Amino acid sequence: MNTNKAEAERLLEIGEELLQKRDLKGSRELAILVQETEPLLEGSDQILAIVDVLEAAEKPLNLNNHHLDWYAILQIDRNSRESHDPNLIRKQYRTLALLLHPDKNPFSFAELAFKLVSDAWAVLSDPAQKAQYDRGFEVEENGLVSFWTACPYCYCLYEYARVYEGCCLMCQNCDKSFSAVSIPTLPPLVPGEEAYYVSWGMFPMGFVFESLENGGGGGGDGSVDKRK
Ligand SMILES: [Zn+2]
């Protein structure tokens, strides 16, 4: 008998015991040892698939309602192009589902991991659900972080999501394009004299106190057009 194989089988058993105790780190180490000892022995890749999926599911997102990270569960980097590639998402799902299917995978937590992968697929394979899920990330990561910029031609102020910093934007007031340079502090608001357009995304959903175009009344110290 091949001693490597016997050794690998022994390691695989230990890996399974650790997995039963949900020692994911230990189980992963053993599965990798098995692969190094006897690459052809079946089982280590099944254990690794379980560990990968459970680890991804153990890091809940800080989204409002604590979604799981479906991309991580399918072993996809959410911030890379992969997350927009339906073929790759399908391929990842297929690979993992085949490794994890409880009829084929005899190890602990295979059923749970399979269910997680199936749930991830249900969301990410449905364009509408995926778009809604992705929007949750955008709000979380960009929507709450904004910057202020001013049109250099008419001095109209805008608030944009941080992703638009440095972008070329069109002023909604004077229709000229300008580079969205962040201004460090927001000038004090003088009601009746300033116009603030609050823009989220490309479409301003502005609220206007009063148009700047007609001189903004007295134009006191806090007025916008003295700032720039
Ligand atoms: Zn302007």
Image (cartoon, rainbow, N blue to C red):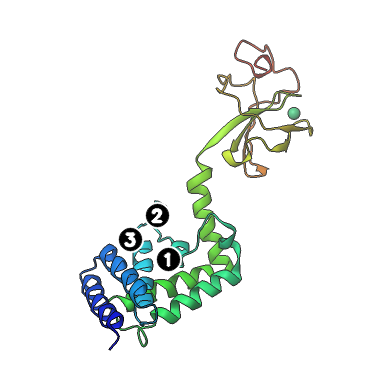
> What residue type is disc 1 on?
Ile
Q: Position of residue 12 (x, y in %)?
A: 27, 77
Q: Pointer 3: residues within 10 angstroms few (<14), some, or many (20+)? A: few
Element carrying mark 3: loop
Q: Position of residue 159 (x, y in %)?
A: 60, 33
Ligand 1 quadrant assignment:
top right
Q: Which residue is mark 3?
A: 58
Which residue occupies the foreground of this view, 143 or 86? 86
The disc placed on residue 73 is: 1
Tell me, yes or no, whether the two marked residues, 2 and 1, touch with CB atoms within 8 Å: no
Q: Pointer 1: residues within 10 angstroms few (<14), some, or many (20+)? A: many
- Circle nearer the viewer, 3 or 2: 3
Could you tell whether 116 is left or right of 10 in the image? right
Could you tell whether 103 is left or right of 223 in the image? left
The disc placed on residue 92 is: none
Q: Is residue 16 above or below residue 63?
A: below
Q: Position of residue 147 (x, y in %)?
A: 57, 32
Q: Is mark 2 within 8 Å of ligand 1?
A: no
Which sits earlier in the primary sequence, circle 2 or circle 1? 2
> What residue type is disc 2 on?
Leu
Could you tell whether 143 is left or right of 175 in the image? left
Which sits earlier in the primary sequence, circle 1 or circle 3? 3
Q: Which residue is mark 2?
A: 61
Q: Is residue 57 above or below residue 198?
A: below
Q: Residue at x 57, y 69 (%)?
A: 88
